């Protein structure tokens, strides 16, 4: 599986924005407003779609380079 590299720092650096974007985008489903507020504060209010796309882009680039 070329996209899942749990020992790679680059993979984790791309995976975290992906997960953060999914959590912020699905706040209405899970109701974790404190967590989503923290993610918004850390990221400076970046839209969830941008975080998800950045995570997917990083994971895809990392797999293409290796």
Image (spheres, rainbow, N blue to C red):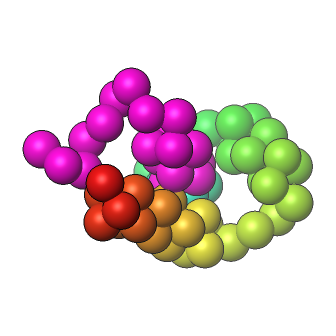
Is residue 26 toward the left or the right of residue 32 in the image?
left
Q: Tell whether position 4 is magenta.
A: yes
Identify the residue at image location x=40%, y=57%. 62
Is residue 15 toward the left or the right of residue 33 in the image?
left
Identify the residue at image location x=18%, y=49%. 2
Q: Position of residue 63 (x, y in %)?
A: 30, 57
6 or 50: nearer the viewer: 6
Quadrant housing the C terminus: bottom left
The stretch in magenta equals 1-20
Q: Quadrant of residue 24?
A: bottom right
42 or 29: nearer the viewer: 42
Q: Position of residue 19 (x, y in %)?
A: 49, 47
Q: Is residue 36 above or below residue 45?
A: above
Identify the residue at image location x=69%, y=36%. 35
Is residue 45 toward the left or the right of residue 52 in the image?
right
Q: Position of residue 47 (x, y in %)?
A: 68, 72
Identify the residue at image location x=87%, y=49%. 41
Picture mark count: 0
Q: Is residue 14 above or below residue 52?
A: above
Residue 27 in sight from this viewpoint: no
Q: Tell whether position 45 is magenta.
A: no
Q: Residue furthest top?
A: 7
37 or 48: nearer the viewer: 48
């Amino acid at each position: 599986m070329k996209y899942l590299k749990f020992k790679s720092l680059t993979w984790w650096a791309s995976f975290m924005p992906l997960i953060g974007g999914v959590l912020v985008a699905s706040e209405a489903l899970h109701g974790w407003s404190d967590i989503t507020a923290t993610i918004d504060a850390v990221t400076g209010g970046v839209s969830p779609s941008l975080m998800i796309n950045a995570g997917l882009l990083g994971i895809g680039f990392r797999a293409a380079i290796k």
